[in-house]
Amino acid sequence: MKSVAMLAGDVRSGASTAILSSSYATDPLRWFGAGVADLSFTTPDTADYSAQSHFTVRFEVNSPLSSTFNDTFTASSTLVPQASNVIAANAFGGLNGPGGAIFGFGPPNEFGPGTESGNPTFTGSLSPGMYTPVVRMLARAFADRGPETGAANASFAFTLDFTPAEPSPTPRA
């Protein structure tokens, strides 16, 4: 899935793009997703741009599973001159289950130019119940003290693998 928005004028221009690719139907025990959010702009006065790529799905576990989540993400943003300081590129995600958050990573709200990257990995057991994985990349800019030029980019690629749990040994008499 791809979404693009562009603006071109006499003295201002901008573009926002978000792309998401995912699969969980082909192999229900191996999920993957990849996304990117990009934006760039030039403005003589004000601008408000955003792009995000977001993966969320709700699923039910009927018998115990082992799970492994692997993610790679990058996020960077620049603003010239650094006048408004309201620009962000960030990555965050996690897995919610019957008792609340099972794991999570990343700052959900961080503004300011900079770069971050990571490779979070989480391994654990899932008991029967409802679960919701969330992975989100956000690129956002709000300029109110132009003229300014800015750019932000965030991307992710993850796998979520499931393995049926080993049955408990049966005691012998």
Image: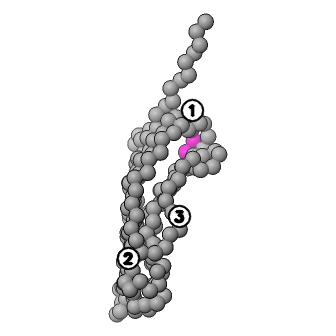
Inspect the magenta stretch and tell me whether residue 111 lies in it.
no
Residue visible at 50% across and 35% down in the picture: 66
Amino acid type, label 1: Ser
**Is the Cβ of the residue at disc 3 closer than 8 Å to that at disc 1?**
no
Residue visible at 58% across and 9% down in the picture: 172
Q: Is residue 60 above or below residue 71?
A: above
From the image, state whether disc 2 or disc 1 is nearer to you.
2
**Is the Cβ of the residue at disc 3 closer than 8 Å to that at disc 2?**
no
Task: Give the percent coordinates (x, y) of residue 89.
Answer: 43, 69
User: In the image, which disc is placed on residue 63?
Assistant: 1
**Considering the image in quadrants, where does the N terminus appear?**
bottom left
Instruction: Give neighbour class at mark 2: few <14, some 14-19, many 20+ (Cα, 10 Å).
Output: many
User: In the image, which disc is placed on residue 78?
Assistant: 2
Task: Give the percent coordinates (x, y) of residue 139.
Answer: 43, 70
**Considering the image in quadrants, where does the C terminus appear?**
top right
Quote the CA–CA distance across marks 2 and 1: 47 Å
- Can you identify the residue that label 3 sits on? 108
Task: Give the percent coordinates (x, y) of residue 102.
Answer: 57, 47
Inspect the magenta stretch and tell me whether residue 60 lies in it.
yes
Residue visible at 51% across and 30% down in the picture: 165
Amino acid type, label 3: Pro
Quote the CA–CA distance across marks 3 and 1: 32 Å
Left or right: 103 in relation to 8 = right
The answer to which of 31 and 96 lies nearer the viewer is: 96
Q: Which residues are magenta?
A: 55-62
Task: Give the percent coordinates (x, y) of residue 97.
Answer: 60, 46
Sequence order check, earlier mark of 2 and 1 = 1
